[in-house]
Amino acid sequence: MKAARLHEAGSDFVIEDVPTPEPGPGEVLIRIGGAGACHSDLHVKSGDIPGVAFPHTLGHENAGWIESFGPGAEDNGFEVGDAVVVFGGWGCGHCRFCLGGKEQLCNTFLWGGMGPEGGYAEYMVVPSVRHLLQAGALHPAEAAALTDAALTPYSAVKKALPHLVPGTSAVLIGAGGLGQYGVQFLKLLSPAKVIVVDTDEKKRETASELGADVTVDPRDADAAEQIRAAAGEDGVAAVLDFVGIDATMALGAEAVDRLGIFVLVGLAGGSFPYSFFSFAAEAVMTTSNWGTRNELEEVLALAHSGRLVSAIEQHPLSAINEVFERLATGQVPGRAVLVPGAPSSDD
């Protein structure tokens, strides 16, 4: 099969012919119909996220069709040919995190594409049918990004929901691929006024189209004052930072009000400015790490209902290096999905 392999951090992907994997006991072979290009993979590619053994096939946002079952994986409610969405936060299945439904937090860190081989290939092996969900009417190329680009902000927004009662405001920083879903989840699941912060005018316009009540350019000298004015006297009940640099974390820490919550999602490596007197009284700061399988099922239910707008652009696997170059320079307005088997522009 064709696979896009990364041989070392800092290098380009190489399209190679490698053996098509065979599913072992309990495993399932998936023919990939879409694999999302994610900033997490960009951080692995650049060497910012260590621990991946090279050469390696990345890709943790995956959907496709069941090609075959390994021994013991049959008779499980799925059939060969079913369109499926792959939950990528694979764990050991028996520790307290896994048994508690938080398999993406397992110490084994067996995330698809990070430990085992991922979906930047024509086929991939999924270790258990418990990681599969029926795609239904969703085409895999459209559903792939839901497994992270939608699941991650959904889980982050759920953490903020107890704070978002009528009359409150939420600040969302970073209206890229994840943030655009975050805007929608805030509007679908909460009564809060949504204030979106982004340096890109087009992304602010997109956020407004998706339901944002107010947008702010953080480069404005009075950006913090604009946020306070939009939030009103009760202040900001929740901040969700999808960027995670020093500047965005400082702005968010300044914006959140008493009893509020700051949720960090972005992986840019910034530091949170905290001291007893500089952070709002009894406010909390937390991170949000992907999401659970059950939350993915909830995301798929929203997608099936037609209430999610997905800005998906599809590219052949052969274009992976061009896609990641655009991703690194902020030129992907929503989510880019790689489609193995799709014709390239040279064909």
Image (cartoon, grey):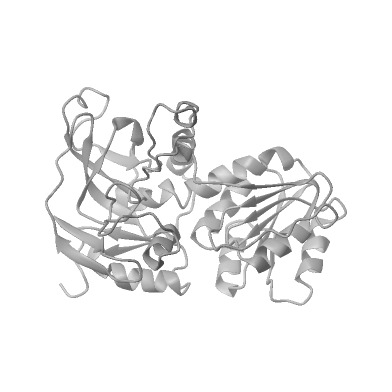
Up-down relation of residue 126 to residue 170 (above or below): above
> Residue 188: in sight, yes or no?
no
Q: Quarter of the image containing the N terminus?
A: bottom left
Number of marks in the image? 0
Residue positioned 45% across, 30% down in the render: 98
Return the residue nearer the eye: 135 or 6. 6
Return the residue nearer the eye: 311 or 152. 152
- Give how far across and how far down residue 89 sits, in percent: 41, 41
Up-down relation of residue 232 to residue 98 (above or below): below
Q: As drawn, is 188 to the left or to the right of 214?
A: left
Check the image and name the residue furthest to the top: 75
Up-down relation of residue 169 to residue 42 (above or below): above
- Give how far across and how far down residue 200 sits, in percent: 58, 73
- Give how far across and how far down residue 325 sits, in percent: 38, 73
Q: As drawn, is 241 to the left or to the right of 102?
A: right
Residue positioned 39% across, 36% down in the render: 91
Q: As drawn, is 300 to the left or to the right of 229?
A: left
Q: Quarter of the image containing the C terminus?
A: bottom left
Return the residue nearer the eye: 143 or 256. 256
Residue positioned 73% across, 76% down in the render: 220
- Give how far across and how far down residue 202 sits, in percent: 56, 72
Check the image and name the residue furthest to the right: 233
Q: Could you say which quadrant of the image residue 205 lies in? A: bottom right
Q: As drawn, is 179 to the left or to the right of 282?
A: left
Q: Could you say which quadrant of the image residue 270 lies in? A: bottom right
> Residue 14: in sight, yes or no?
yes
